Image (cartoon, helix red, strand yellow):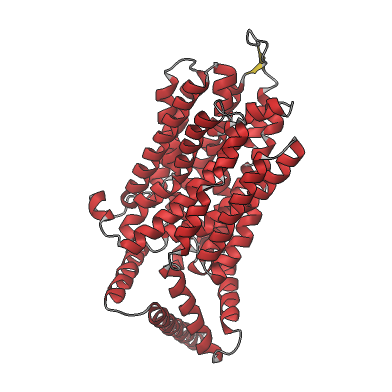
């Protein structure tokens, strides 16, 4: 399946000349009938549902803990006697260090499995959310949020792999969209508990952080009760069998097998990895650019109180949830890139109404803007999984996503800082006001165009590769139903891959001999 998905399209002028014109023709929807989503979801068994929902829940609480800062910017700034732009550095440093967590977590996740590194990151969440609520000044707060960024970056890769890699092929689109909007669920929960705790409790914003440390305890218990993913166990058995065939095993054979497979995968896919990072810079920028400072925009510039702000933000994230699931579902039948490009066009068209309205009409425009922000994200988890080589799925998925976050990490700080250059008349109580809406609108419009261009230029599975992946998934389910163990499936794949490699080498030798004879 990797022949067209790997970065071979970059390695020669002939390949490049063939690749770029094909970006138009490759947008043709695959010849796959639109299936009833209920029937698609009924394909999942208990193991697959449990793995999906533990990954989804962990990602949702990851988002909850992240948004505790963006929702409390004004309150934290007031207590620490600073400007909102200074507090927004708490968002920025979190985003800047997520790549380090992804690097560490991805390496361990692909070597030892997704389970224990996921649990380790959830444990870190508990400690760091509690610590955030006890900070006494901005220096302490930024230090704690920096450490939280490492833990946050480390969670996504194993959570996504846990949720998605064991799914039936047809279910990947719709559940990819739903998984990604664990982010929206986290935002909604953070917004609701912000309203319930921050304005009503003695400790204000601190109580929100302390509350955030509780649910990861239950997630850890849940994950402890579940096994490693089938996909990882098969991949592990496959690489061990392949290494044993080459070197008769021996002590340390598993580590050598992993390092060998990882090295080959990265060498084959380095340019694809660079593309994924560039793409994720745009995707993370549209999320953070339209969301992180929007609560501050509503409270400071528009003049909404806590209740109206909560309503607008919750409605927006409901839109993101619906849009992500819907467009993620359709992407299986329209193609990933075409679905994302349509979302870019509509999202860009809605920008003026997103930042210029000053009444309750914002509720509708925020819903539809976030519908397409969520929608463009909907196919991304499965799209990145499809691009990533199985040997380094957690590493490449997580690291490319978080390096994109690093590139976009200053979005909210840039918006806040530039917005403060456009002061508005203060409130009757003397509170300073700034034109954040103008900056959010310009930034988001530019990013929508950026995403549209790079999605258009990017690779995607061909129809042949889609059929092969679907057949491989079906074959796996049939073997499992027959009682074949995961280790046996992995060994069988290693043997088949070895035979295919021998056939290719024999074919190349035959072509060489024929060429020599002609000469």
Q: Position of residue 199 (x, y in %)?
A: 56, 25
| Left or right of 174 on screen, residue 86 | right
Task: Residue at the far top: name it.
Answer: 428
Pick the residue in front: 297 or 372: 297
Image-quadrant location for residue 292: top right
Q: Nearer the viewer, residue 215 or 420?
A: 215
**Where 318 sits versus 213, above or below?**
above
Image location of residue 368, percent across then percent down: 40, 30
**Image point (48%, 43%), residue name:** 183
Up-down relation of residue 168 to residue 251 (above or below): above
Q: Residue at x 65, y 23 (%)?
A: 419
Q: Residue at x 50, y 66 (%)?
A: 389
Within the image, what quadrant is residue 104 found in?
bottom right
Which residue occupies 42% across, 25% down? Answer: 365
In the picture provided, is 380 more to the left or to the right than 208?
left
The percent position of residue 81, horizontal first and vertical second, equals 74, 26
Residue 56: x and y in percent read: 44, 51
Q: Is residue 152 above or below residue 509?
A: above
Question: In the shown orientation, is residue 363 left or right of residue 428?
Answer: left
């Amino acid at each position: 399946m990797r022949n067209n998905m790997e970065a071979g399209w970059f390695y020669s002028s002939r390949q490049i000349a063939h690749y770029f014109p094909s970006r138009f023709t490759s947008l043709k929807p695959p010849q796959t009938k639109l299936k009833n989503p209920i029937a698609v979801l009924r394909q999942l068994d208990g193991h697959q549902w449990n793995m999906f929902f533990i990954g989804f829940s962990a990602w949702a609480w990851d988002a909850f803990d992240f948004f505790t800062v963006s929702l409390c910017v004004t309150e934290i700034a007031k207590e620490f006697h600073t400007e909102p732009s200074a507090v927004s550095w708490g968002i920025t440093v979190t985003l800047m260090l997520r790549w380090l967590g992804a690097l560490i977590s991805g390496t361990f996740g692909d070597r030892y499995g997704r389970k224990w590194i996921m649990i380790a990151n959830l444990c870190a969440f508990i400690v760091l959310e509690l610590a955030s609520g006890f900070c006494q000044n901005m220096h302490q707060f930024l230090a704690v949020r920096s450490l939280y960024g490492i833990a946050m970056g480390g969670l996504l890769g194993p959570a996504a792999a846990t949720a998605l890699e064991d799914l039936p092929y047809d279910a990947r689109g719709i559940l990819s969209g739903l998984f990604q909007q664990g982010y929206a669920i986290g935002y909604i929960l953070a917004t609701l508990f912000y309203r319930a705790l921050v304005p009503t409790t003695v400790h204000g914003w601190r109580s929100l952080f302390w509350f955030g440390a509780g649910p990861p305890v239950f997630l850890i218990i849940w994950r402890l009760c579940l096994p490693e993913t089938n996909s990882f166990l098969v991949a592990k058995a496959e690489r061990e069998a392949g290494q044993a065939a080459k070197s008769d095993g021996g002590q340390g054979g598993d580590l050598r097998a992993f390092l060998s497979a990882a090295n080959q995968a990265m060498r084959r896919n380095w340019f694809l990895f660079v593309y994924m990072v560039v793409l994720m810079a745009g995707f993370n920028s549209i999320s953070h650019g339209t969301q992180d400072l929007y609560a501050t925009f509503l409270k400071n510039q528009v003049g909404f109180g806590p209740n109206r702000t909560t309503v607008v933000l919750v409605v927006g994230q409901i839109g993101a949830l619906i849009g992500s699931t819907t467009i993620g579902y359709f992407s299986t039948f329209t193609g990933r890139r075409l679905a994302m490009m349509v979302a870019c066009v509509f999202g860009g068209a809605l920008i003026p109404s997103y930042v210029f309205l000053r009444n309750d009409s914002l509720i509708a425009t925020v819903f539809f803007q976030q519908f397409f922000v969520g929608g463009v994200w909907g196919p991304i988890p499965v799209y990145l999984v499809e691009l990533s080589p199985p040997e380094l799925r957690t590493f490449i998925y997580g690291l490319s996503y978080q390096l994109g976050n690093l590139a976009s990490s200053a979005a909210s700080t840039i918006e806040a800082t530039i917005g403060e250059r456009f002061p508005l008349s203060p409130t009757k109580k003397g509170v300073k006001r700034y034109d954040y809406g103008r900056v959010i609108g310009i930034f988001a419009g530019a990013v929508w165009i950026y995403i549209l261009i790079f999605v258009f230029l990017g690779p995607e599975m061909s129809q042949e590769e889609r059929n092969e992946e679907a057949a491989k998934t079906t074959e796996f389910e049939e073997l499992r139903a027959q009682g074949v163990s995961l280790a046996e499936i992995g060994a069988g794949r290693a043997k088949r891959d070895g035979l295919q490699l021998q056939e290719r080498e024999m074919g190349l030798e035959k072509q060489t001999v024929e060429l020599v004879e002609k000469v």
